Image (spheres, grey):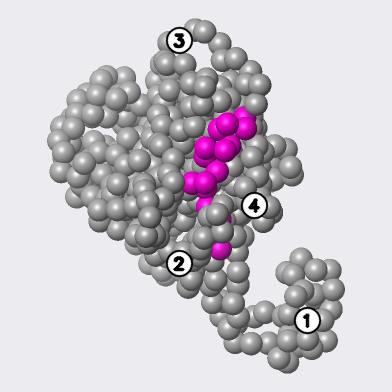
């Protein structure tokens, strides 16, 4: 599946909604059981009480943004991007009457969580907007201003000015929510104001490829375009999530940002207008079964360090490429995706204990977290061997410049045989091979020596640089 945000495809086929999802807190009379409580939730006879109490605090957000260039010729201003006749008219009329700029309107949802007029919504609902209007169930309308936004988690904080105190929703505790618990959503799907839907929590800690801090709640409560930014509520009427994405194809699966993650971000947006995150200075990747075998690891838990930022906190502490981080500040790292979230939540300048597995031995380091200035991205890369189905050439200064590489030594993948072990592993032409089985590769001679050491059927560990990213890959050498 492909995640779609703002029209750009991502991994995992999910659509972000530009409309709202309204939080309907069903069953105020039937609160969510505390952690460890075994008594099952009763099926509510109605969600009406929750909807009645929660709806006044759920708002419709409409935006206007100026889009430069493009647009439909003047005679057909109402024709949509998807209209089958659009291409014909554009070809016929060309650029006649096409304005250099045009106004684009969109709808979304949000909810008031503070009587002073503070509203939480999705960043993609208000991003780039010239004007933001908030409409309430009592028909009152307010112009909203942005106090802060955080694209990395797709959250935004708005404020409206009202003469009287406003209705608001309480923020709950998403950590207490259990898979199978009832949840309610209230929003404006497809522009249909204040629609209430109910379902259950289908899963927790979903990684959908939306960004470095994926940790979504999954629900089967109906969420559609227009629900974005609206609340997901428990039966006590508390917000436990912010609806953000849906799976394409009308399959009924939606995703919400856990409110516990949102609390800290919103507090920073209110105070500073931006989010300050901790930084470790490593590029990490998931540990596959093949990588676990190559590194002699007993399990696939932890985050494999693919590269270390020179002079960064991890580098200064002594953490190296190939280390597997299994604990950060006393918190275990079960999945590699746990680490970015935990590091981001750590105060800048705090000294933390980081435990790693290096060559089968546990090592402990003291690291002083830095401040994240630029998002670190990890790319995929592959591996090689005896007859691995790839050709290489030595890196020259001219080739390095053409490929945008800072290094001027090493060997570059110049070709791959379709279906070969190297191709199956993910290697691509232009990849720079840095190491084979932990041995540095500086020239063709090093490469040839490394190949001679590879046995039949052996898993070969490659370290490859692709663009600005570095990653490990495993390639299985053929037998015979």
The dominant secondary structure in magenta is helix
Tag in front: 3 or 4: 4
| Vertical position of residue 168 compared to residue 68: above or below | above
Left or right: where 51 falls relative to 397: right
User: Disc 3 or 4, which lies upstream in sequence?
Assistant: 3
Q: Which residue is mark 3?
A: 37
Task: Say the numbered circle drawn on residue 193.
Answer: 4
Q: CA distance from mark 3 to mark 1?
A: 60 Å
The residue depicted at 28 percent of the width and 49 percent of the height is 268
Q: Which residue is mark 1?
A: 76
Q: CA distance from mark 1 to mark 4?
A: 28 Å
User: Disc 2 or 4, which lies upstream in sequence?
Assistant: 2
Tag in front: 2 or 3: 2
The secondary element bearing badge 3 is classed as loop
Residue 462: in magenta span: no
Q: CA distance from mark 1 to mark 2?
A: 30 Å
User: Disc 1 or 2, which lies upstream in sequence?
Assistant: 1
**Image location of residue 433, percent across then percent down:** 43, 48
Left or right: where 158 falls relative to 124: left
| Vertical position of residue 329 compared to residue 71: above or below | above
Tell me if mark 2 has few (under 14), some (14-19) or many (20+) residues whose alpha carbon lies within 10 angstroms of its own: some
**Image location of residue 126, percent across then percent down:** 49, 61
Total marks in image: 4
Task: Say the numbered circle drawn on residue 143.
Answer: 2
């Amino acid at each position: 599946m492909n995640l779609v945000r703002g029209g750009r495809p991502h991994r995992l086929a999910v659509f972000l909604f530009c409309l709202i999802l309204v939080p309907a807190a069903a069953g105020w009379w039937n609160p969510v059981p505390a952690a460890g409580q075994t008594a099952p939730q009763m099926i509510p006879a109605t969600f009406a009480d929750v909807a009645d109490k929660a709806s006044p605090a759920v708002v419709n957000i409409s935006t206007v943004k100026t889009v430069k260039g493009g647009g439909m010729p003047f005679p057909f201003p109402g024709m949509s991007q998807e209209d089958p006749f659009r291409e014909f008219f554009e070809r016929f009329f060309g650029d006649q009457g096409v304005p250099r700029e045009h106004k684009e309107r969109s709808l979304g949802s949000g909810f008031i969580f503070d009587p002073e007029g503070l509203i939480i919504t999705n960043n993609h609902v208000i991003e780039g907007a010239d004007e933001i209007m908030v409409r309430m169930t009592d028909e009152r309308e307010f112009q909203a201003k942005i106090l802060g936004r955080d694209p990395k988690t797709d959250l935004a904080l708005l404020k409206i000015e009202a003469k009287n105190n406003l209705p608001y929703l309480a923020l709950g505790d998403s950590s207490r929510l259990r898979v199978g618990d009832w949840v309610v959503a209230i929003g404006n799907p497809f522009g249909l104001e204040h629609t209430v839907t109910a379902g259950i929590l289908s899963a927790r800690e979903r990684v959908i490829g939306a960004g470095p801090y994926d940790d979504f709640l999954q629900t089967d409560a109906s969420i559609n375009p227009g629900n974005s930014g609206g609340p997901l509520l428990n039966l006590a009427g508390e917000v436990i999530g912010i609806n953000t994405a849906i799976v394409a194809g009308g399959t009924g699966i939606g995703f919400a940002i856990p409110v516990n993650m949102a609390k800290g971000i919103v507090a920073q947006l209110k105070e500073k207008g931006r989010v300050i995150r901790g930084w470790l200075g490593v590029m990490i990747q998931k540990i596959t079964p093949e990588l676990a075998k190559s590194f002699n690891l007993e399990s696939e838990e932890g985050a494999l360090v693919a590269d270390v930022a020179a002079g960064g906190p991890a580098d200064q502490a002594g953490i190296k490429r190939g280390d597997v981080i299994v604990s950060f500040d006393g918190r275990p790292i079960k999945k590699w995706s746990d680490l970015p979230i935990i590091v981001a939540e750590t105060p800048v300048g705090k000294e933390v204990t980081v435990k790693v597995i290096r060559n089968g031995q546990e090592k402990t380091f003291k690291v002083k977290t830095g401040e994240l200035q630029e998002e670190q991205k990890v790319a995929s890369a592959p591996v090689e061997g005896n007859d691995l189905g790839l050709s290489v050439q030595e890196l020259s200064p001219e080739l390095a410049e053409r490929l945008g590489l800072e290094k001027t030594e090493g060997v570059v993948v110049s070709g791959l045989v379709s279906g070969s072990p190297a191709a199956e592993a993910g290697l691509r032409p232009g990849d720079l091979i840095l190491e084979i089985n932990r041995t540095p590769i500086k020239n063709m001679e090093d490469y040839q020596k490394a190949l001679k050491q590879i046995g039949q059927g052996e898993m070969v560990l490659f370290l490859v640089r692709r663009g600005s990213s570095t990653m490990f890959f495993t390639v299985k050498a053929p037998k015979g």
